[in-house]
Image (cartoon, grey):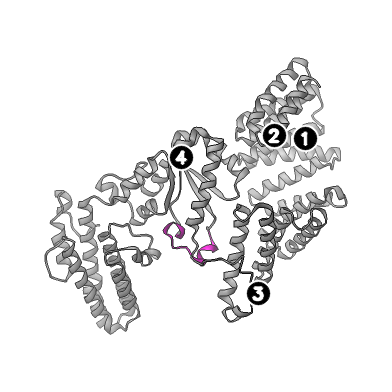
Amino acid sequence: MNKIEELTKQAHKLWKEGKEEQMLPYLRKAINLCKQENNFSKQIEILNEYAGALRLYGNYDKAVESINEALELIKLHYDTNNIQYATTLMNKANIYREKKDYFTAEKLMLQSKEIFDKKGDKSYSYIGLLNNLSLTYQEIKDYTRAEQLQLEAISLLQGNAQYNVPLAISYNNLYEIQKKLNKHTNAEENLIKAKDLLSKEVGEKHPLYSAVLNNLAELQVKNKNYHKALELYKNALEIVKSCYGNQSDAYLSVKSNYDYVNDLILTLEPDKIGNLKIDKSYSNPSKTEKLLDKSREFSKQVEKLIYEYFPALKNRICLALVGSGSECLYFDDELSKDHDYDLRCQLFLTDEDYITYSQKLEHIFSQYLENKVIIQTISSFYIYYTSYKNGPSTIEEYRNIPDEYLCSATNGEVFLDNLGEFSKIRQKILNYYPQDLIYKKLAYHLNNIAQSGQYNYPRLLKRNDKIACSLALSEYMKHYMQVVHILNKKYMPFYKWSFKNLKNLEILGEYTSKKLNELISSPDIEKENIIDQMCKKLVSQLNEEHFTTGKIDFLTYQANEITQNIQDENLRKEDNWIK
C-alpha cells in the first residue's frame, strides 16, 4: 500500500467514525502527494472527497475551491464530456444547494444531467443526480418537476433486486412531494410499495419500516381515518422503541403524533370511549404536557452535543425557549398543535460566536438531532422584540414598544445561560417600566376605563346601539386588564391571551377573571352595575397600593391624582390621555 492509499484509508476510517473534520488533514496530505506524483486521476478523486467533507462542515467557499480545482484538472488532462466531469459538477451543485443558492445548483445539475444523457448513462450515479435535482426543486417548491425526477429515479431502480432498499426510500420520499401536490391516492400507493419492499428486504422491525408507517399514518389522518392512523402510529412506536428506546427523539416524535390522534378520537367520539381499544401504555399520561417542558429536556441533548464538539463554547452559550407562541406562555393545548408547534429550543450566541460557529453547529445538529435548534444572536433577538440590542433603557425607548412585544421578550424559560448576557438583558426588562412611566400608563388606562365603561356604555345602552355597546365593552375590558397587569408589574401578552393570563396575576387577577366572565354572560341591564362594582374595587386597590388616596370612583379623578406623582416635569405636564 502506497502513502496516498494509507492516507485515504485513514481518512475513510475517520469518516465512518463520524469525525469528518479530523479527516481533512489526511486528505490534504494525499492531495499534495498526488500533485508531486502527477497522479491526476487520484487527485481529482480525492479533491471531490475533500470538497464533500468541507461541505459537511459548512465550509462552502473552500469546498467550491476544491471542486473547481478538480474540474480544471479534468479539463486540462481529460475530456469534459465524461462521467467523471458530470459527477464532479453534481458534487459542486450539492455545495450550492446546501448554501441555498438553488439557481446555481439547478444550473450545474442540469449541465451534469446533459452529459449523463449524451452518454446514455443510467448508472447509480445518475440516479443520485436525479434525487439531488428533485430535492433542489422541492426546496424552490417546484413540486411538479421534483415529482418527475423522483419518478424517473424510481423507474431506473425498479427491476433490480439489489436496489430494493433505495427504491423503497425513493417511494417514501415521493410521498413528501405528492403530499404537496395533493395526490393523496398516488401517495398512498407508493407508501404501500415502500412498506412491502422494506418488509421483504429489511424486515418489519427496522427504523426505515417505521418511517413508512409514520407517513402512512399521517395520510390516514388527512383522510380522517383516525383509528387506522392510531394503529399505524402504535406499530411505528413499537419499532422505534425497540431500536432507539423510549427516550429517543425518534420515539418522542412518533409518540407526539400518536397522542395527537388519540386525543382527537376522544374529542370527536366521546360516546365511543368505552369501545376504543387504545393501548394505555402509549396514551398521553397528561393532556397538560407542555412543549416548554419537552423543550427543557431537549435542551439537555443540545447542551451535551455542544460540550462534546465545541468545548470552546461551553461557557458562552444560552439555551432557551422564548418569544412568540402559546407554548412560551405555557398556554399551549391540543388546538395549538395545528400550526407552528415543532419541538425546538433556541441557542443564543454573541455576534462574534455566531459568525464563527453557526454553520458548524447547524451541521452537527442536523447529524445528531431530529428536532430543531434555532441558532440566533442575542442582539438580533432583542432588536426584533424591542428595537434595541441591549433592550430598552429610557422612558422614551420603553414607550416605543408595545406591551405584547415586551411580554414576548421576557416569557418562556431560559434553560441555561453560561455567559449570562442574555439573562442580564432579560432581567432588566423584567424589572418593568421606569416608575414615572408606570404612573403615566396607569393614568392613560384609567381614563379609558372611565370613558368606555363608566361614561359611554350606559349612554349607548340608552340609545339601544348594540354594536357600539359591544365596542365600548371591549375597550373597557382591554383597559381594565391592562391596569391589572400594571399593578402586578407584568407585561400584558397579545390580546387573545390577555384574559387567560389573569390567572397568573396575584393582584386582582382572579377577581377580574371572575367579574369579566360575569360581565359577558349577564343581561345588558346588569352590566352597568358590574362595571360600577369593578371600578370601586379598582379604586380600593389603588388606595391600598398607595397610588392614590382619593375615594371618588369615577376613574378620571384617580388618573389625575396618579399623574401628579410623575417626577419628570415634561411627562407630568403631558396630556394624560396620551399613552
Quarter holding residue 364: top right
Residue under label 1, please give it: 86
| Residue found farthest to the top | 36
Q: Position of residue 498 (x, y in %)?
A: 36, 64
Q: Nearer the viewer, residue 258 or 60?
A: 258
Distance from the alpha carbon under mark 2 to that under mark 4: 28 Å
Residue extent of the magenta highlight: 326-339
Secondary structure mostly seen in the magenta stretch = helix
Is residue 525 rendered to the left or right of residue 162? left
Q: Earlier in the sequence, mark 1 or mark 4?
A: 1
Is residue 388 rendered to the left or right of residue 303? left
Q: Secondary structure at mark 2?
A: helix
Give the answer, above or below, for where 235 lies relative to 273.
above
| Residue occupying image coordinates x 74% and y 33% | 88
- Residue 493 in view: yes
Distance from the alpha carbon under mark 3 to that under mark 2: 47 Å
